[in-house]
Image (tube, rainbow, N blue to C red):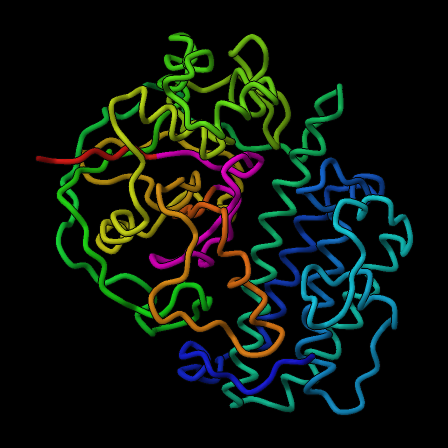
Amino acid sequence: MPFVSPTNPVVERASPVENADQAFAAVRARTLALAAPLSAEDACVQSMPDASPAKWHLAHTSWFFEHFILAARSPGYRVFHERFDYLFNSYYFTVGQMHTRPRRGLVTRPSLDEVLGYRAYVDAAMHELLERGPGDPELGFLVMLGIHHEQQHQELLLTDIKHLLAQNPLLPAYARLPPVASGDAAPLTWVRGTAGLVEIGHAGEGFAFDNETPRHKALVGEHSLASRLVTNHEFREFIDDDGYSNPALWLSDGWSTVLAEGWQRPLYWQDDLGQEFTLGGLQPLRPAAPVTHLSYYEADAFARWAGARLPTEFEWEAAAAHANPAGNFADSGALHPHPAARGSALQQMFGDAWEWTASPYAPYPGFRPLAGSLGEYNGKFMCGQMVLRGGSCATPAGHVRTSYRNFFYPGQRWQFSGLRLARDVA
């Protein structure tokens, strides 16, 4: 089922995208640049059901533009391959059935070269359509949705390839990363948060996903937020204090997961607790850098051990509205978290690491998903997952905003996920 007339306020407020063709070309070129260091073998393999092969990301993002824009809005457009609707659909069941996700790594054909040819075919048709149809607000919204969708997959491409390369005994690097400054962590201070009735959600300017709407009021109690993210050194203290062996610190599901998975340290930390696997290969663990690749369970257990808690997404958003929006994003080329800068203000609210919150991923009051098949994009996942905020060192710059809501299951930890502490104030 193609996109139908919008009923969501986000779309109703949409306006023509200036320079849509240039924005489209830039994001498509960026994806190719991220995939360039990979061999055809790298691009085909799937390391776990939660991850996807790089080749699949390259094809799926092309399918998104083909299915939801070209096939629906470009008269005479012929799809590149009739079976790609089945092969590269992700979870849009109103579109049709799809190849099962855990078996994406078994698809050796089409080849990487054929997938790149598919991308070029879609790109040419999109450029032609955008030249013909400037000023169409609905088309403008769909193009921006496709661009932001592709940016999400750019981050997934990086985190999925990191997980894949970590399975290789040689621990090969994805790329040569720039050196990271060493030194001690900035002192952790506590910053009084905004309390009372606060405005939450997309304010109506620029692009947003439907799950960021509608803007509404939320009641926030008196609280303080830590000035920076929790560091590797601080998490090492949790490990040394037998944090992974103390069931009193863990949620019931978390403790069951620790026992079932044999967790003893964050994902990618080595047995010696002095090295970690990065996109630049095996590197010394930097004590002052933010700890990452934590599950919600680990973040929650650490907060309890530290005599604190995780912030709610509303506490986080109220603080982020007044924070510096700059941060260490993927565009910096670091592809790894940096230590916090000195200072008593809130640091690292954007970039470096996604911040687990204590909030379940649920609809805002009055939430309406996008109409048609695109309504499956966010709304149907609002069960059993937790909200993360702020973006990471693998997130494209300009992709996140104060109201952006990421979400993962509490046991997942292959993303650059970390934590900031919060505490109640009497």
Instruction: Name the magenta segment's main secondary structure.
Output: loop
The image position of residue 194, as x and y in percent, is 15, 49
Q: Residue at x 38, y 45 (%)?
A: 327
The image position of residue 97, as x and y in percent, is 78, 65
* Quadrant location, the N terminus: bottom right
Q: Residue at x 72, y 37 (%)?
A: 48
Is 109 within the magenta? no
Q: Residue at x 65, y 91 (%)?
A: 132
The magenta region covers 393-419
Please state which of residues 123 and 43 is positioned toward the viewer in this rendering: 43
Above or below, 267 relative to 35: above
The image position of residue 360, as x and y in percent, is 40, 48
Is 418 within the magenta? yes
The image position of residue 102, as x and y in percent, is 76, 45
Above or below, 145 relative to 171: below
Q: Residue at x 16, y 40 (%)?
A: 223
Direction from residue 89 to residue 228 in the image, left or right: left
Quarter-of-image position of residue 207: bottom left
Above or below, 56 relative to 304: below
